Every structure is written in structure tokens, then in C-alpha cells.
Amino acid sequence: MPAQIMSLEKGGTEFPAKLTKQVFVCSIIAAFGGLMFGYDIGISGGVTSMDDFLLKFFPTVYVKKHNAKEDNYCKYDSQYLQLFTSSLYLAAIVSSYFASLSCKKLGRKPTMQLASLFFFIGAIFNVSAVNLPMLIVGRICLGVGVGFGNQAVPLFISEIAPAQYRGGLNICFQLLITIGILFAGVVNYFTSHLHAWGWRVSLGGAAIPAIFLGLGSLIIVETPTSLIERDRKEEGMETLRKIRGVSDVSKEYEEIIHATELAKQIKHPFRNLMKRSSRPQLVCGTILQVFQQFTGINVIMFYAPVLFQTMGFEGDASLLSAVVTGGVNVLCTLVANFCVDRLGRKILLIEAAVQMLIAQSVMGGILAAHLKATNTMPSTYATLVLVLICIFVGGFAWSWGPLGWLIPSEIYPLETRTAGFFFAVSTNMVFTFIIAQAFLTMLCHLRSGTFFFFAVWIVIMGAYAIFLLPETKGVPIDEMNERVWKKHWFWKRFYSDEKASC
Ligand code: BGC
């Protein structure tokens, strides 16, 4: 029997709640949205390094790749090849806005169902693609699925989780992202041996997480907040009782009623978000996602096999290395699950910044010294770079990865929470798109300097975490303004003249 806990919510009120099987199962099912996202992140790099795929859709890249004289750093540089990877994120940026409306009007559960449907259609297009436009249409459908999923899932988990478990349950989303990336790496490893059509299996595999989410979402509950928000109060009360595992949920119910009434008074949440008093959360929630992407993580996630081939690993070894980094990613995310509510957010972010800075700089140094335009890097150095990549990925996995999603979901007051979270999701997609679109070109022009470029960003984000980011560990979500923002040495100034400016 799970222990009964008392959740601390608004004004320090205690809400009785158990961590019920229902909450746990619903969170895991919803987190399959993360599996879709992760599968996609992990699959494209492997597929774009497969000869059969290049020959069919990107013959000029295929020729460049096999031209012995071709510059190591430039052999994959193709705007079209990058567009294959990044078109998904473009679609996700646009769709996350519609997903935020759908979350509000239709509910979190139907939004997740739409996500799985779009993702499934995208997988079908990709598995049967006979030309580039078909491939891109498939990617766009997958992107719409990702936009809907990433908007609804973290919100859904945060709303059904009891306060004390919110951090750990929320990080299940990131955990499933990392499992999706690893799963994709394993699939690519095997399909690269299936000549002529292995890439189809890789891309078609995206249907599996979509089916999991689609079928799973048939048995999950809708969140009480969403039901109450849409005037289905009795159903909301019933669901709350069921998921909390206690008979008296009246205090929490009243709290949700109060919060939704307040939120309903705000007719224009996006306009409200532009007020001076919303600026601290808006800046922090958004910039965290910018920083998350400027760690350079997706260079590894999207292009690991390509990068390893650039360093001289053979086809097989390079895909295997992507599996190794994927494994490190999953294991180190578990560290975040256990540490985030014990050690706090800031310490994880700062420690990881130092770790990632060292890894990126040494990596850049090794490539500068040992990977010239046309040589093959000595294998000891290539292996050392693989170790450094693992150190880098490990640091990211217990910090900027999960916290990039967790912190924006916990810092906003209810009236601006969904609108604010939309900014986090779309910023993530915009910057993922930029990195996906620009990396191979950057690698070609900046060469090993690419890694120093990311190292500089890591210095900036480390300083930001030290001086400007407030600690939110253990603070009840509806007391953030009073206990965090209004007390912070820098951000408190946005509240001092609140009346005058709003
Ligand atoms: C990021 C992705 C990244 C993944 C790696 C996520 O939190 O949003 O861009 O690829 O972590 O695990």
C-alpha cells in the first residue's frame, strides 16, 4: 500500500493524497509522448548516414561522402539533408500553438490522442516514401505529433501528480525521451544491415510509440483541472477522488475551482504574459530552453553516427557508438529522477555546466589537433572523443535536459501557466530547428571551432544558473511568486512597481 502523503499547495494548505497506481500508470502512459519525441531525435542521424537512404533521396551527398578527396568536415553538408532532419521541428513550432488551444478547449487527453494520430500518419508516409516530398510530408506529420505531444504531456503529468512527486513524475517524460533515443539507436544498428530497405524499417518504427500512446490514452483519465475548467465539475471531483486514493478531496477540489475561476478572469493569457510582473518567469522559462539547445546536445543526438563517421569510425562502429551514448543518456537521466528533489535544481545545472564545458573544450582541442581535412583520426583519439561525448551527455542528462522541461512547468502562476509553457515548447523547437539546420554547415565552415562555439555558450549558461536562476526545489507551485520571485535579489524589482506598470 503506498504511503499517504499530504501535498502542500497554495498558501501552505495541505491536500491529502496517495501516490496511487492510477497516477503512476497514467503518467507512464502519457510519457510515451516522450518516447515518440525521443525516437524521432534518435532515428534521423542513423538514417541519414545509411548509404541506401542517401542513394535514393540524396544522391549528391552519397557521391560526396564516397569521394576520397572530400573534406572530412564537409562531406555531409547539404541543406536538403538538414531539411530532412529539421522540417519536423518547423511543423512542431507551428502546431504547438494549436496544441495549446486544443489543450484548453478539448482537454489534455484528446490532445495526446491527436498527437499519436499525427505521428502514426507520419510514420506511414515515411515507411512508404518513394520520393523526397513524401519523405518531408511524413516528417511534417511527425512534427505536428511532437508539437501536440510535448505541449500536452508535461502539463498532464503535472496536473495529475501529487505535489511531492511532481518533479520525479515530470522527469518520466524526459526519461522516455532518452529511452526513445536509445531504442532508435538500437533499431538503426540492426536495420543498417538490411540492405536497400533497412531505412524504411527505421522510419516506420516511429509507429510503435504512436500506437502505445494511442492505445494507452484510451484508458487514462482526463485531468481534474481540465474537466473543471470545461465545466464538468462533478466528473472532475470524481476523477480527483479516484486518482488521489482518498475519500475527502474537498480542499484540493476547492483549490482547483478557485484557480480555474481566477484563470477564467484572464481573457487574454498571452497578453497577461507580456506584463512586467510576468517577465521573470517568461525570461527564465524561455531562456532555459535556448540554453538547453545551445549546450550542443542535439549535435550528438541527431548527428552522432555522422560525427563518428567523420572521425573515422566505420559504419557499424559509428552506429554502435550512438547506442553507447544513448545508454549513458538513459542511465544519467535516472540520476536526475532521484536527485532533483533532494539536491535542488541549481546545483545540478551548475555542476553539469562545468562538466560539459570541460568535455566540449577538450573534444574541440583533440579534433583541432588530430582531425584534418582529409586524414583519418588515430583510433585512440577517436575513442577518447567517444568517452568525452559520454561525459558530456551524462552531464546534460541529469541537468539541462530534464530541467529544461521541469522548471518552465513549475514557475508560472496558473493564469499564465499554459501560455507560458507554450513559449517553452516552441522555443525548444525553434532552437532545435536552428541547430539541426545549421550544424552540418557549421561543422564544414567552423570545423573543430564548432565545439568551442558551444563551449562559450556553456560558460554563459553556467553564469546564468549561478547568478540569475532562483532555486525552486520544494516550493509549492502556487507560492512561487511570494517565496521565490519576490525575494530574488534581481527579479524582485519586477514586482516593486507592479501597480504602476500594469
Ligand atoms: C531535449 C532534446 C534532446 C534530448 C536529449 C531533451 O530534453 O529537448 O532536444 O535531444 O533531451 O536527451
Image (cartoon, rainbow, N blue to C red):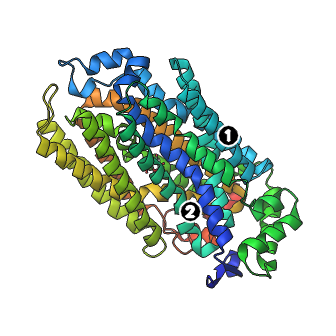
Residue 110: x, y in percent? 74, 48
What residue is pinned by disc 1? Answer: 117
Residue at 32 percent across and 25 percent down: it is 76
Residue at 67 percent across and 58 percent down: it is 156
Any part of residue 466 in sight? no
Any part of residue 473 in sight? yes
In front: label 1 or label 2: 1
Q: Is residue 184 above or below residue 413?
A: above
Disc 2 marks which amino acid? Answer: Asn
How many numbered tags mark residues here?
A: 2
Left or right of 7 on screen, residue 319: left
What residue is pinned by disc 2? Answer: 170
Position of the N terminus by quadrant: bottom right
Q: Residues within 10 Å of mark 2 (few under 14, many from 20)?
A: many
Secondary structure type for disc 2: helix
Q: Is residue 237 above or below residue 434?
A: below
Q: Is residue 96 above or below residue 174?
A: above
